[in-house]
Image (spheres, rainbow, N blue to C red):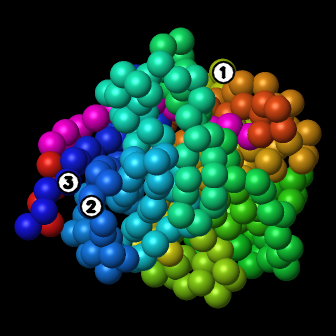
Amino acid sequence: METYRYRKADAFTSDASNGNPAACLFLDKNQILSEDAMLEIAGQHRGFVSEVIYCRSHDGIFLTYYSSEGEVSFCGHGTIACMYTLIKNTPSLFSCSEIPIHTNKKGKLTVYNRIADEDAVFISAPAPSYLSTSLKPEDTAAPLCLCDEDISREFPIEVIDAGLRTLIVPLNSFQKLVSIYPDEPGLKEFCLQNDIDIILIFSLDPVDTNNIAHTRVFAPKFGYLEDPATGSGNSAFGYYMLKHDIWDGSLCSIEQGGNNRVFNSIKLQFQDDLLLFGGKATIRIDGVYYY
């Protein structure tokens, strides 16, 4: 049995919010886990965290992401959880303002260390892909437990991949946005049929007017209904807002969550032709994992 450095951390926490949990396993240069082993460990975390992040720090920092269902192309909240806690607890990294990382599916990204000034790290989102879709409001309403008229016509339904293939759906009512809880198996089938990783619904009428928008993200494809705080989904939404002149790219924040939680906070900024998403993380467990 091998032991691995282990942290369970909640990403995008703010004030009383609980953020989004991720488990981080830190592998030294002599530790290797097979794909089957990474999936098995992620399966052991089903219902405890949404994703497990495997971090190998040897000749660079390499991240691989797994949910209980399989490997995930990219996990924004997991990257925040892993890198915030790693930088904060590693003096040689804490002194660096920019840290390159390598992701298993999305290549090289950059972490911007703003812990000293803003108590946050920012991650450069993967370059966006704007994907065609034939989905119309009447196609998306029922799987989300909505009526056709709940979906706004002011902005279009689109699919943008900024780490994960994200279906973006505008809603008319904030109250409807925070109160729906779709059927997980039905929504998963809808995602699989339409080659969608996650669904982001949004309103431009947030509770806190210091925020630019309110979002919720559903991810049944990965073994759970809702993602309470999302890096990749909100990055796709950031590109969507830029495209439709909702946002000018300056530092902003988005509140996320349904009416069953204190809303989480995700920061966005468009800088040097890069979209950055950022936040802090709170360590809940710090120890070793036996496998």
Region rendered in magenta: 275-287
Q: Residues within 10 Å of mark 1 (few under 14, many from 20)?
A: few
Q: What residue is rendered at 25% in x and 69% in y? A: 41
Quarter of the view holding residue 64:
bottom left
Residue 212: percent from the left, percent from the top?
71, 31
Mostly what secondary structure, the magenta segment?
strand
Residue 73: percent from the left, percent from the top?
56, 66
Q: Earlier in the sequence, mark 2 or mark 1?
A: 2
Residue 129: percent from the left, percent from the top?
80, 63
Q: Which residue is mark 2?
A: 31
Local secondary structure at mark 1:
loop
Residue 215: percent from the left, percent from the top?
62, 46
Mark number displayed over residue 4? 3
Local secondary structure at mark 3:
strand
Front tag of 2 and 1: 2
**Cα separation between marks 1 and 3:** 41 Å
**Left or right position of 249 against 17:** right
